Image (cartoon, helix red, strand yellow):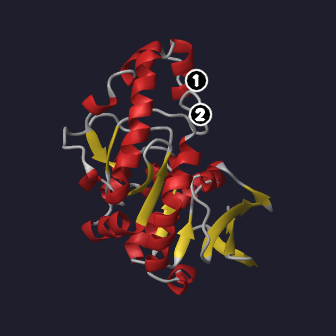
Amino acid sequence: MIILFSPSEAKIKGGEKRAFDKESFIFPKLFDKRVEVLNIYNDYIKTASKERLSKLFGLKDENEIEYYKIDLFERESKKAIERYSGVAFKYLNYSNLSKEAKKYIDKNVLIFSNLFGPISAKDEIIDYKLKQGEKIGDFSTDKFYKKYFSQVLDEYIEENSPILDLRANFYEKFYKIKADFYTMKFIKNNKVVSHFAKAYRGIILREMAKAKVESIEDLRELQIKNLSIKEIIKTKNKTEFICEIKE
């Protein structure tokens, strides 16, 4: 099973100094394409004005802006699933999972980084800041990764289906799934929710890892507190579980 996941703006700083090479990432044959993006980003942050960096990073604090101006390749690396610390990742609480549950996530989860593109949860990534939807000057990372990584993602997904897409809609710009896939929409009091959706994506991934879900049948049978499947809607290649959040 493959689970597609969004990154988060919030990240944990620090890590360890490690070799940065193609063995650090999934899809090693496309490592040079990743490096191309990182070099564009690195060159830009060295020369851009504070105003442009503030927009690029999504930051106002000058000390934070100065911190992220440091050469990207001088920074420490950390496992992607441990680097991100937004709402979904807090509810996932990866650090407190069992060894087997962590292995499940490392094996099955692909995260769509705004800078690094599609990466495995276990890939080692450098601390960075790139606000969702921001261009690096005139360069769009989403268009670049969609162009160069779509084919390898198609092949990878075909070999590892079924697919559960837990990404925010924005990340369809990086990759549009062509195969049959499943996704989830969260409602409360008959209204679609956004903030709670982030939390429940983390909760669902956590419970899937604990139960070692490998099929859609397993997913349907998964019991999650205060959450139930209200309806299932199939449209073309997408099957959407409408999940109701109870009080």
Disc assigned to residue 5? none
Report x, y in % for residue 48.
49, 17
Q: Secondary structure at mark 2?
A: loop
Residue 81 % position (x, y): 37, 53
| 112 relative position to 183: left or right | left
**Seen in the image, is 16 located left or right of residue 161?**
left
Q: Give the quadrant of the C terminus.
A: bottom right
| Residue 246 seen | no
Q: Quadrant of the N terminus?
A: bottom left
Residue appearing at x 53%, y 73% in the figure: 163
Task: Classify residue 98 as left or right of residue 229.
Answer: left
Q: Is residue 10 above or below residue 147?
A: above
Q: Nearer the viewer, residue 131 or 210?
A: 131
Q: Position of residue 88 (x, y in %)?
A: 51, 52
Q: Earlier in the sequence, mark 1 or mark 2?
A: 1
Say whether marks 1 and 2 touch (CB < 8 Å): yes
Q: Amino acid at mark 1?
A: Lys
Pointer 1: residues within 10 angstroms few (<14), some, or many (20+)? some
The residue pinned by badge 2 equals 134
Q: Residues within 10 Å of mark 2 (few under 14, many from 20)?
A: some
How many numbered callouts? 2
- Residue at the limit of the structure toward the right, as seen here: 190
Q: Is residue 110 visible?
A: yes
User: Residue 186 appears in which quarter of the rendering?
Assistant: bottom right
C-alpha separation, residue under disc 1 versus residue under disc 2? 8 Å
Q: Amino acid at mark 2?
A: Glu
**Mark 1 lies on residue:** 55
Name the foreground residue: 62 vs 237.
237
Circle 1 sits in a helix, a strand or a loop, which is it? Answer: helix
Residue at 39 percent of width and 77 percent of height: 212
Q: For the point 38% across and 33% down, which residue is it?
A: 39
Q: Residue at x 39, y 28 (%)?
A: 42
